[in-house]
């Protein structure tokens, strides 16, 4: 069976289905040298008996991030000789470093005292727990092995960063950082990128990769319904809140009038409508200039990504919270595909990438940001001078509870009671560094909760077109195509702050789910299933009669194609073809809308409204784009569009 990372929604939908592969990783004991015998000898002494193990191969599994991680361990009488990773549902890219490093470190050191890989803690712990289980099965002492010291591995995937001079320094290796680095390099600049974690990708890697853009070619077969028309009219009816908003609204009004006069029955969409809808969804707190910059560059950026090896499906749908049928997707529904292409092209373009390298503070000379002090992979502080500029792309602060509590003005409780499905690296470092050199912060109080944080561990699709949300009473409670903050607030009001997404077999097939994938999820309890709605309800633990009525009413609403009692306007298929599926979810901290203020060139603005020379920023480390609420599917284009813009402008700053 192939690994199932491509189909699981857990961390990411969201941010999220991610890709996987069908290989198993095997680590065998290397030839022992004199320098490597100490750990094995220590293990033998700690085992409290002659012959530490009963020879043979033993299997075990432990809970990872997305489900069970299975592995087998082979023992001689005195040592662990081989570890083979079997079936699992971990997210490719996020988990790769753990699978690559930890089995080898265990075998080399004959120790369970191996540190978890930063950014892949759950996967790392699953490997260690499963190996410990096998040690116990083989008659060994797992606790003794945890006390065995681990030798430092002098080898690293990349060279260790030393003092350096470069044209452009990019801080952060997620989608925004890699876009900036590639863009700057393609403009002829020499580039260094530093990433504090052990792997690239950030939140872009963890997410489902949804990319919103108006796209006439891919949207040409999507019908314009009465319900969608009413959504346009509603936004156009909003009173003017600023001169910039009034101008944008007038442009959309003109486009809408021309569209209706043309007799066109296919989906209405333009960069200006995308911008106006995004501003409306952010309660008119977003910067109109920045939103216009975003939506006028999304299609060009999508095509740039295509030119750099990113593939997109032809189907365009509505990812959760996207509000409109403009969400594009990679074939694997994974941001990992985007990161892989960007990393490949950046490396081939000459970008030097350093992992485990944490920027600590910016270097400012004569009022210009011209580098940073970085703690390298060896723990040594070094300085990178950047002649043309520094691009900050460190992400937001979802993983920093203290910062969340400090700035929150939106939620009753944003502290430790809520987890985050973001990268553990999202701790606000870039915001702190920027503020220290006078950068202005905007929108810091607005923090988005993602309603789709998997509780059961799996999922079918992050799209809302053909699915319904129900609570533990088996009833719908919200318009599924609503804003994410509205969805999250509605979920928090339900029993146990939990809900289910119900869909059918045709939706599963439409989203690329194979029988193998579905069987794995159902067998491992990641998704509830039933041949009938009543059987599904029984397995979910909700009242069957209530769920049957809910599904029937939903199907009638789909056929009507008009706004329903909850105000839903996005419809596609009914839920009628068994088997039926339902994973469970609960909200998690997902996106921080606030950060460094920038202009349309990606330049950072200080507290006096002036550009900080040599300082650029892109992605979630910035603020002012999304207002109070980020539209689902806008984060990836935000990071990549402004990353591309910031990188190019930094390269041109000679």
Image: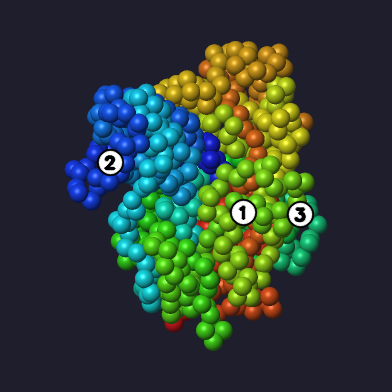
* Dot 2 alpha-carbon crowd within 10 angstroms: few under 14, some 14 to 19, many 20 or more: some
* Dot 1 alpha-carbon crowd within 10 angstroms: few under 14, some 14 to 19, many 20 or more: some
Secondary structure beneath label 2: helix
Which numbered disc flags the more N-terminal residue, 2 or 1? 2
Between 41 and 240, the residue placed more toward the observer is 41
| Residue beneath disc 3 | 409
Which numbered disc flags the more N-terminal residue, 2 or 3? 2
Q: CA distance from mark 2 to mark 1?
A: 42 Å
Circle nearer the viewer, 2 or 1: 2
| Residue beneath disc 1 | 400
Between 333 and 459, the residue placed more toward the observer is 459
Q: Is residue 586 left or right of residue 308?
A: right
Q: CA distance from mark 3 to mark 1?
A: 16 Å
| Residue beneath disc 2 | 41
* Residues under numbered marks 2 and 1 in contact, where contact means CB atoms less than 8 Å apart: no
Q: Position of residue 396 (x, y in %)?
A: 59, 57
């Amino acid at each position: 069976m192939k690994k199932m990372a491509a189909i699981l929604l857990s961390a990411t939908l969201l941010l999220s289905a991610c890709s996987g592969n069908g290989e198993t990783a095997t680590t065998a004991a290397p030839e022992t040298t004199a320098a490597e015998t100490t750990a094995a000898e220590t293990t033998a002494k700690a085992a409290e008996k002659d012959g530490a193990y009963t020879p043979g191969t033993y299997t075990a599994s432990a809970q990872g991030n997305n489900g069970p991680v299975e592995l087998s361990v082979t023992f001689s009488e005195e040592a662990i000789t081989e570890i083979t990773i079997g079936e699992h549902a971990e997210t490719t890219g996020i988990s790769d470093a753990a699978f690559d490093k930890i089995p080898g470190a265990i075998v080399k050191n004959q120790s369970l005292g191996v540190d978890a890989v930063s950014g892949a803690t759950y996967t790392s712990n699953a490997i260690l727990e499963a190996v410990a289980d096998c040690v116990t099965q083989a008659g060994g002492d797992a606790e003794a092995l945890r006390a065995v010291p681990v030798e430092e591995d002098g080898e690293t995937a990349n060279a260790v960063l030393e003092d350096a001079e470069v044209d452009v320094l990019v801080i952060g290796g997620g989608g925004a950082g890699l876009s900036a680095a590639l863009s700057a390099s393609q403009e002829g600049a020499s580039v260094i990128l530093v990433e504090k974690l052990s792997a690239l990708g950030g939140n872009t890697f963890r997410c489902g990769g949804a990319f919103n853009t108006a796209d006439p070619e891919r949207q040409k077969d999507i019908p314009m319904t009465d319900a969608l028309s009413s959504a346009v009219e509603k936004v156009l009816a909003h009173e003017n809140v600023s001169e910039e908003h009034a101008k944008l609204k007038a442009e959309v009004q003109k486009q809408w009038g021309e569209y209706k006069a043309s007799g066109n029955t296919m989906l209405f969409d333009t960069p200006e409508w995308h911008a106006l809808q995004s501003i409306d969804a952010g309660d008119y707190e977003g910067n109109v200039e920045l939103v216009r910059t975003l939506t006028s560059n999304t299609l060009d950026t999508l095509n740039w990504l295509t030119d750099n090896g990113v593939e997109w499906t032809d189907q365009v749908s509505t990812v959760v919270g996207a509000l409109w049928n403009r969400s594009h997707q990679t074939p694997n529904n994974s941001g990992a595909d985007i990161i892989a292409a960007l990393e490949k092209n950046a490396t081939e373009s000459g970008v030097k990438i350093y992992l485990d390298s944490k920027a600590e503070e910016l270097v400012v000379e004569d009022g210009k940001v011209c580098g940073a002090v970085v703690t390298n992979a060896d723990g040594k502080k070094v300085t990178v001078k950047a002649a043309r500029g520094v691009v900050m792309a460190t992400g937001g602060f979802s993983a920093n509870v203290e910062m969340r509590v400090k700035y929150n003005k939106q939620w009753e409780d944003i502290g430790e009671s809520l987890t985050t499905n973001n990268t553990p690296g999202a701790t606000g470092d870039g915001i702190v560094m920027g503020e220290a050199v006078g950068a202005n912060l905007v929108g810091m109080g607005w923090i988005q909760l993602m309603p789709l944080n998997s509780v059961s561990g799996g999922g079918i699709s992050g799209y809302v077109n053909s699915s319904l949300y129900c609570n533990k009473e088996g009833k719908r409670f919200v318009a599924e195509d609503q804003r994410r903050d509205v969805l999250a607030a509605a979920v928090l009001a339900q029993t146990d702050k939990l809900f289910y997404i119900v869909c059918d077999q045709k939706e599963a097939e439409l989203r690329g789910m194979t029988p193998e994938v579905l069987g794995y999820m159902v067998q491992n309890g990641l998704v509830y299933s039933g041949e009938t709605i009543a059987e599904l309800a029984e397995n979910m633990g909700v009242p069957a009669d209530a769920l049957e009525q809910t599904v029937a009413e939903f199907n009638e609403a789909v056929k009507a194609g008009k706004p329903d009692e909850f105000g839903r306007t996005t419809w596609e298929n009914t839920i009628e073809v068994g088997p039926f599926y339902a994973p469970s979810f609960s909200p998690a901290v997902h996106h921080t809308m606030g950060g460094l203020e920038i202009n349309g060139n990606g330049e950072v603005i200080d507290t006096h409204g002036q550009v900080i020379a040599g300082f650029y920023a892109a992605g979630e480390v910035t603020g002012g784009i999304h207002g109070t609420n980020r539209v689902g599917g806008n984060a990836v284009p935000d990071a990549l569009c402004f990353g591309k813009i910031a990188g190019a402008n930094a390269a041109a700053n000679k």
